[in-house]
Amino acid sequence: MIEELIKGAEPRFQKTIEILEEELGTIHTGRASVSLVDDIMVDVYGAKNPIKAVATITIPEPRSILIQPWDKSNLAQIETAIRDSDLKLNPVNTGENLRINLPELTEERRKEFVKIARDKAENARISVRNVRGDVLNQIKKSKTDSQIGEDDMYRGEEDLQKIVDKYNKKIEEILANKESDLLTI
């Protein structure tokens, strides 16, 4: 029973890691990446859509992103969405497409991005703790309902903590890699 509870939490822990990796992918390191802009939401056709759903995004040069809308009438909406995002990017509208040239990051901007990355990692750790709390409550409820014994409860708590430690270590590794990318000039 306890093993099932812990196994049931495993996908939730994994989802937390995936979300963290996606969020950190949006923090640019001075190098162009499709993931930087592909999930920015654009108001087109009366609904919000990610840019990747209404345009082709390519990387023609290491520090530039080219966005070609499938429908040229959406160019202004895409440009506005990029400008309004928290990425502080300034796309150039050529009439046919949008070009984003990524500026060289200053030391101050790099440190600001590291701080943002640390905040996102902390949110991931909080998410892991919340999942752990949910599973611990279920284990304790099982003990209260006399479905398991006290020894099983403590063993389950230890097993769960080992998994939580494993995922917290993954979060730290992902953060360390991102910090290294951000601080490398």
Image: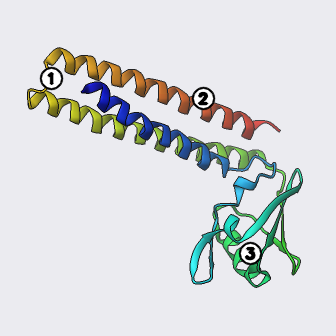
Q: Nearer the viewer, residue 104 or 99?
A: 99
Per the model, the C-alpha gap separating discs 2 and 1 is 36 Å
The answer to whether residue 136 is left or right of residue 131 is left
Q: Which residue appears at 74% of the width and 75% of the height?
A: 79
Q: Circle 3 is placed at which residue position?
A: 79
The answer to whether residue 28 is left or right of residue 155 is right
Residue 142 image offset from top left, x and y in percent: 15, 31
Q: Compared to 98, does 1 lie above or below?
A: above
Q: Which residue appears at 41% of the width and 25% of the height?
A: 163
Tag 1, which secondary structure? loop
Corner quadrant of residue 149:
top left
Between tags 1 and 3, which lies in front? 1
Q: Earlier in the sequence, mark 2 or mark 1?
A: 1
Q: Earlier in the sequence, mark 2 or mark 3?
A: 3
The answer to whether residue 15 is left or right of residue 44 is left
Q: Circle 2 is placed at which residue position?
A: 173
Q: Amino acid at mark 1?
A: Ile
